[in-house]
Amino acid sequence: MKKLDTQSPDFQAELKALLAFETAQNPEIDRIVADICADVQKRGDAALIEYTNRFDGTSAQTIDDLILTQDDLQSAFERLPENIQTALKTAARRVESYHKHQKMESWTYEDEDGTLLGQQITPLDRVGIYVPGGKAAYPSSVIMNAMPAHVAGVKEIIMVVPTPKGERNDIVLAAAFVAGVTKVFTVGGAQAVAALAYGTESVPQVDKITGPGNAFVAAAKRRVFGVVGIDMVAGPSEILVIADGTTPADWVAMDLFSQAEHDEIAQAILIGTSQAYLDEVQTAMNRLIETMPRRAIIEASLGNRGAMILAKDLDEACEIANYISPEHLELSVENPQAWAKKIRHAGAIFMGRYTSESLGDYCAGPNHVLPTSRTARFSSPLGTYDFQKRSSLIQVSEQGAQKLGKTASVLAHGESLTAHARAAEFRLKD
């Protein structure tokens, strides 16, 4: 891992270089995705079947070969060992409980002339969730995307998940059953995103698409945004740990590994206030890496984008964290709630030495779909509010129309919009 020191005159430049990640769209990927999306929009199910057979190595003859029903999902759940069933239900229950606290409610009030104003909250009608299904299975992604939609009151939750070589993962399908997914299509890639966005003969058009995917999925989500809503275009996973030296070095080392093992471009950063402690963590990492099944990926990730930063104190560490704006921030310090108040930008804040980031990934309750690549400066985790809409309510009383009409008339004439002015003036008594 790179070693940075805030007292170095080159620190800011080194930090900026460390965080740099090429997010520019790949023209070749964009071209391929554009062609796929246009084809699915034109040919519907036929194109979807063709691309799925080509890219996933399946042999579907009809769209029915790519559809799973509630009975299929329940059967997958029932095939699992009891301990996995229990874990899925526990995670779903905790995620549901947390997201119920996020649910927005409608409200109204009346001003002094009897005019009613307010806000009406309604759920989206139908959403699509994308669940990766290539190198690994992610039942947690199913729960994190479907459960807040369920809590919001979305009536139809359509899931798409690729099944390379036709291999279906029971844990992923069981998670869909537990989280209340309506229907599953075993398709993936840009073709799945296009099907959800435009609709086909069999895949219903959704209002919003959420969930992570590869570069082709990300490009497709960018392309269809505007036709449908999307959650975000996520970058590589990130973790930033601020440690005051009171947490066992092995724990911190494994927390860094937990994000580095995602892929070679994930980012793990440790900020400490003691060089001796940073050295202790490095020693622990050197020893523990021998036990990691995904050692090659972890080493590549830490070597490519990982770093240890020596800060002069925790105040400075928090300011660095605000600049980094990480997806996951662990405050592995004494009195973490006090230090959390100094954090302005982070996707999720994990407070205290017992709060490993991995608990948030699976079962703590808050959502693990989080802003990456410094976008936590202006965006938030996926939540129930992402599956709800707000409509403004305005009911002007007769008395209110007299006052508001005159104000609107003046402003409309000022914009040379005569019809606007007269629409308000017609309702005036004098």
Image: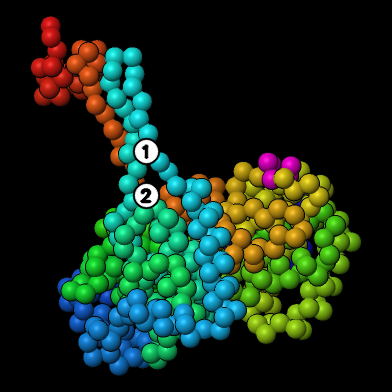
Q: Amino acid at mark 2?
A: Gln
Q: Which mark is residue 106?
A: 1
Numbered disc total: 2
For the residue pair 120 and 314, the one nearer the viewer reads as 120
Q: Is residue 249 above or below residue 153?
A: below
On the image, the x and y values in percent for residue 169 come to 46, 84
State the extent of the magenta-drawn residues as a range: 338-342
Tell me the mark number nearer the camera, choosing from 2 and 1: 1
Q: Is residue 335 in the magenta section?
A: no
| Mark 1 surroundings: few (<14), some (14-19) or many (≥20) residues within 10 A | few
Q: Residue furthest top?
A: 430
Give SS at disc 2. strand
The local crowd at label 2, few if under 14, some if 14 to 19, many if 20 or more residues have their Cα within 10 Å, is many
Q: Quadrant of the N terminus?
A: bottom right
Nearer-N-terminus badge (2/1): 1
| Residue underneath mark 2 | 388
Who is closer to the viewer here, 269 or 241? 241
